[in-house]
Image (cartoon, grey):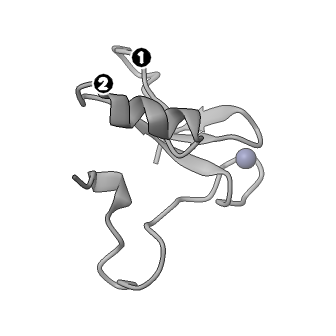
Amino acid sequence: MSYPWEMPSIRNKRKKPFRPRCRFCRKNDEVIPVVYGFEITEELLEKEQKGEIKIGAAAIGADRHNWFCKRCESGFLR
Ligand SMILES: [Zn+2]
C-alpha cells in the first residue's frame, strides 16, 4: 500500500516525494509528513518509529500541522 505522502511529485517522477522546507531552518531533509485521518496500523506505527512520518493526534482546530521538522522539533503547515 502506498500513502499520499509517499507519492513522487508529478514533475519529478524519479525524485523523492515532495517535502516542503521547514519554516525555521529552511531545509527539508528532516521534514516528515504528519499523518491524520488514517487508521493507525502496525505499518504506520513502524514508520513512525523509523522517523519517516509522525502520527498526528486527533487534533481539531487551527493547530493541525501537516509537516514536522525533526531538527527543530516543530510542526508547520504548508
Ligand atoms: Zn527545521
> In what element is the residue under mark 1?
loop
Q: Is residue 73 above or below residue 11?
A: above
**Mark 2 sits on what residue?**
40
Q: What residue type is labelled 2?
A: Ile
- Within-10-Å neighbours for mark 2: few <14, some 14–19, many 20+: few
Q: Give the quadrant of residue 60.
A: top left
Are the residues at dot 1 and dot 2 in contact (C-beta closer than 8 Å)? no
Q: Which of 64 and 31 is in front in this view?
A: 31
Indicate left or right for 60 with 53 as reference.
Answer: left
Which residue is pictured at 36% across the width and 16% down the height? Answer: 61
Q: What residue type is labelled 1?
A: Ala
Q: Is residue 58 above or below residue 27?
A: above
Q: Residue 45 carries which label?
A: none
Q: Give the quadrant of residue 70.
A: top right
- Counting the numbered discs, the total is 2
Indicate left or right for 32 with 29 as reference.
Answer: left
Residue 13: percent from left, percent from top: 35, 83
Q: Nearer the viewer, residue 47 or 22?
A: 47
Q: Is residue 12 above or below residue 22?
A: below
Residue 10: percent from left, percent from top: 29, 79
Indicate left or right for 67 with 74 as reference.
Answer: left
Which residue is pictured at 38% across the width and 34% down the height? Answer: 44
- Within-10-Å neighbours for mark 1: few <14, some 14–19, many 20+: few
Judged by depth in the image, the label closer to the viewer, 1 or 2, is: 2
Indicate left or right for 76 with 10 as reference.
Answer: right
Residue 27 in view of the camera: yes
Q: In this view, does 3 lie above or below 53?
A: below
**Mark 1 sits on what residue?**
57
